[in-house]
Amino acid sequence: QVQLVESGGALVQAGGSLRLSCAASGNIFRIDVIGWYRHNPRELVATITTGGATDYADSVKGRFTISMDNAKNTVYLQMNGLKAEDSGVYYCNAEVTSGPPYVTRPYWGRGTRVSVSS
């Protein structure tokens, strides 16, 4: 089993910054891709592969930066220039290969709430 635990959500004023973290633990052979989804409405925010390739939603490009500490199996989302529309519950998602025997499946964290006041 694999667990994803998010942290860093908070109430912040518009224009402010937050840093979200998601730590993966358990039977991890390899994390293929890991990232953040936002539930308000539900959309992809940013993802990163273990090779370092990143993808961002158009709405956050230039403001958010995703990074990963492979040694710690932890992904970060640096959020700058926050807007009211960034508010929502942010979920960590990862495609993880566990084993042996080797099986790849998606995992979700329980979410961390970001509230941006205008």
Image (tube, rainbow, N blue to C red):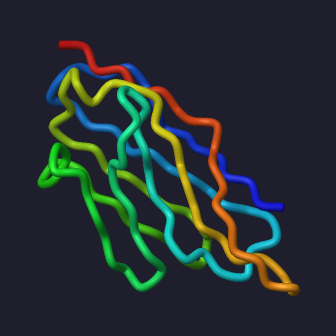
State left or right for residue 77 relative to residue 15.
right
Quadrant containing the N terminus in the rendered view: bottom right
Image quadrant in which the C terminus is located: top left
In the picture as drawn, the residue positioned furthest to the right comes out as: 101
Q: Residue furthest top?
A: 118
In the displayed structure image, the side of residue 96 where residue 78 appears, left or right: left
Count of labels in the image? 0
Task: Identify which residue is drawn at 57% across, 36% down.
Answer: 111
Q: Quadrant of residue 46?
A: bottom left
Left or right of 115, for residue 8: right
State whether residue 110 is above or below residue 73: above
- Counting from the top left corner in percent of width and height, residue 67 is at 38, 66
Task: Please name the residue shown 45% across and 58% down the image.
Answer: 35
Would you place residue 51 above or below residue 94 in this image?
below
Name the residue located 25 percent from the left edge and 58 percent from the top edge: 56
Seen from the viewer's position, the closer of residues 78 and 96 is 96
| Residue 71, quarter of the rendered image | bottom right
Residue 20, how many percent across, how many down? Answer: 44, 45
Image location of residue 23, percent across then percent down = 62, 56
Query: Residue at image x 36%, y 49%?
Result: 44
